[in-house]
Amino acid sequence: MKTDSNAYLTFALGDEKFAIPVDHVQEVVEFGQVTKVPNAPLYMLGIINLRGRVLPLLDTKLKLGLSSTDRTKKSRIMVLDIHTEDDKNIQIGATVDVAREVVEISANEIQEAPEFESLKTAAPITGIVNRQGDITLIMDITRVFSVTEVLELNRSLN
Amino acid sequence: MKKTILVVDDFASIRDFVCETLQRKGYETLGASNGNEAFKVLTEKNESINLVLTDYNMPDCTGFELLKKIKENPAVSKVPVVFLTTESNPDKMRSAKEAGLSAWIKKPYRSETFFAQIENAISNG
Amino acid sequence: MLSAMDSNQKRFVEDALDLLNELDEGLLQLEANPQASAPLEQVFRTMHTIKGGANMFGFENIGELAHQLETLYDLVRQGNMQVSDGLISITLHAFDKVRDLLQEKDASKIANAESLKDHLKIAVQFLKSVETESVSSASNGSNSAITKDELATFFIRVSPTISMTPDGNHPLVFIIQDLEALGTAKTLCYKREDATVIHWDIFLSTTTAQPEIESYFLFVENECKVEYNKLLACDLFGADEFKQFIDQFETTPVSTEALQAIVKKLAATVENKTAHEEEAESSATGKKKFNDTYIKVSKRKIDDLLNWISELIILQAQLVNATSHINSVEITEVTEQLEMITSRLRDTSLEIGLVPIETLVTKFKRLVRDLSKTLNKKVNFLSEGAETEMDKDVIELMAEPMIHIIRNCIDHGIESPADRKTLGKSEHGTVKLKAFNSSSYVNIIISDDGKGINRESVLKKAIERGLVAADAVLTEEETLNLIFHPGLSTASAVSDVSGRGVGMDVVKQKINDLRGYVSIKSMPGKGTSIHIKLPLSRSIIEGLLVKVEETRYVVPLNVIDRIDRIAYDTLIRDNHVNKTVVVNEETLPVFSLRKKFHNETAAPKTTDIISVTVNGIKKGIAVDRIEGKMQTVMKPLGDVYQHQDFIAGSTILGDGSLALVLDPARLFQLSEN
């Protein structure tokens, strides 16, 4: 999705640093009680109550095929508003190990991602930012959490 | 020899449908869209037309008027006339009978009745 | 020229669509009772209103059409024309076209439509033909007596004066058949040894007047002699005695003395009965006449309002929880009041989105009428409980499935009039729709008195298609439920009328999606009935709150039969999730939530069993503990959880935690794994 503002929310999954356009992010919250919904794939952690709203919570790392790490005090939930490929608007919570700052990234800083997906993680990447060796991968969040994909994975696992 | 029926109705779709139905049963058909045209066709082809099958409610010249015209003209008066209509008023039926109508078929019709009446009218006039 | 519609035009379109519905209803009533004045007035008024609005908002073509048809009905009001099948048909078709047109979003498309021109032509023609008739009949000096629409039973003896056989091709044979089609008839044919007809004796009960009956023989006057006898001004076929009486005359000619005697006898009793029926009918229609004022509100506003009310209910529960430990009389009083008011608000909010299913009923009447004509069947449509209310969205979603069911009734269920006669049934079949409320559900039962479902052929087909093992033993219920299986279609050839892309499996799916239930009952030769149950509200639920390990679930109250507590050991004899236990002296298959979904901590000593009945089948759900009854707002889980459909949604408890609402029907499907 094209974004006019150059603001990105950065966060860490394991050792890697990622960024997504702030347009997708409603807020970042701490972990609270998670109610597990049975019979669902492992990366679907369950549902949470966000001030009266019920949101599905997904484990971003597990969704990307990485092994999950234990929850720490720094773990956070990004509340995302995603416009999916099948033209729906869904709201979900996605876990991150560390939530970082919002930074400005201008278009000319973004280099094209190499054909093979990210170096250490299997994340769909739309670009790479290299600031003196500090590498941030721009993640294509709509692809990570596309509903169709989630459902298909779901179906195949069941 | 195939019998020929002149079908008169101002609605082209109904006229075509009736002609088709008759053709499938083995009749030849001619069509006319109003009473005046029908009369003209009849006087021109009078030898070859075995029956006039006409609607009752038509603009300009109704079926009843056509019936009278035919029966009052000695050249064509022997041709049997049959009405095919949604009308069912007994008084009108009686008037038509007195004017020389051979049969009155009500719409919607069942094909058995329809063909039986037509054949009877052609054979017995 | 404006292409988008302005708000006035939009308003007109909305109003017009409502009016068209009313118009349909009026026309159908008028068709059934051509002499009745109330439907006539309604039809006239409605067309007049449509005409006025159409002309005012730029749809002159619709206005003109309405004007032509209105003129026709004005003639009827003045007594210069009678309501006929032709008139009703052209009116229905014309306004069907208008209805289609009004679905266009583009105003100029509607105003410029050519498609109304044909209907306009037909209407003008009809008008002209009526005018020429009244002119000619006036000039003939004849008095087309408008005879009263009276039901009467006739005895007609037709004696041919030329030789003919009953299966021959003489028009008289077909005329007799046409006569029979005028109502309920019994024809006796007396033949000579050479198979030629001596005479036909016909008993006919019909609303057709005698002059018209006589006109049937007008053109064969020279070939037969006809005697008419009007027996009684009512339907004698309603009396068993009469039917038995005429049965005895199969071979011997009807004795006119005996006939007169029995008619005299029945005259007294039958007339009493019809008087009673008329009374009952008028009191029943009287009920419908309560008057209420209605206003139009945008659906969005209603949805917003209902959302806020749901939030309020949750907040109220949280307040109770937060203040539960505070020992203050004042606070307790206020929270209790709050609870009562919230509960009232909840009830009212449930009702706001509800509308009576009347509009659907009118659609069905139309459908039955059109279908019976197409399929050459005689079908009466009865409805009971049209004032029952249902969520508007649900009505719209259920329209298609119900149309499909009714199509099936007429296409596959109701036999042809000839077959019905042979079976001793009345020629007119009946399709009935009954609607009523029970607890928090709306019930709709659609039934027919046709030939029912052939269980053997259903089972056979299911076995053929591999849906069921060849040696499987199924209960009656299970066999009938096979109808809902996607692999099964009982029509051997897909008939044009039904079976196109909509199957009973789709019907069931749609009902399930609405978290409703559907069951089917059938008796061969007698008929079939389909029972649909739909929840009144899709978001507010009542249920039992239960706990399994640390997770809380809610089991919807309306499927629960009873609860019991048994030792947990009873469940662990095998490793399966499903186990049959004895509860209340009956065996019950039990689905253990703990075994299926949770198995980490040690199980408690006892387990609570909730017995539910779903789709006619009894099963138990085993939980650790039942915590209590509750009523709350259910929130959907979201698209990502589409596959976990055994969970209908979640609900926020007083302490802010979430409970999962179970869908028992879908839960049990899981247990097949």
Image (tube, grey):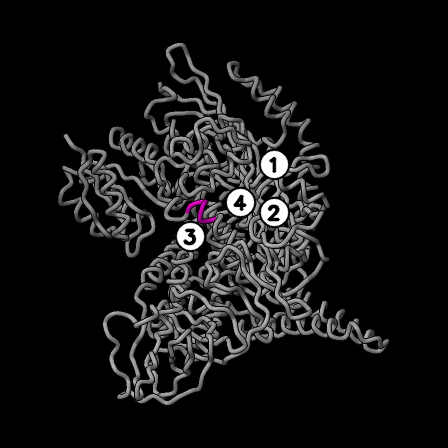
- Label 3: which residue? C89
Of mark 4 and mark 3, the one earlier in the sequence is 3
- Which of labels 1 and 2 is toward the front? 2
Q: Are marks 4 and 2 in contact (CB under 8 Å)?
A: no
Residue C49: in sight, yes or no? Answer: no
Name which residue lies at 58% across and 61% down: C538
Q: Nearer the viewer, residue C333 or C234?
A: C333
Secondary element type, mark 4? loop
- Which of discs 2 and 3 lies nearer the camera? The answer is 2
- The answer for which chain carries disc 4 is C
Query: Do discs 1 and 2 share a chain?
Result: yes
Estimate the spatial distance between the alpha carbons at disc 4 and disc 1, rounded to whole Å.
61 Å
Mark 1, residue position: C234
Residue C370 location in percent, x, y?
43, 48
Identify the residue position indicated by label 2 in the image.
C592
How many marks are shown on the rendered structure?
4
Q: CA distance from mark 4 to mark 2?
A: 9 Å
Magenta residues (range): C503-507
**Disc on the earlier residue, 1 or 2:** 1
- The residue that appears at 70% across and 39% down in the rendered structure is C583
- Residue type, numbered disc 4: Ser
Tell me whether marks 4 and 3 sit on the same chain. Answer: yes
**As drawn, C257 above or below C296:** above
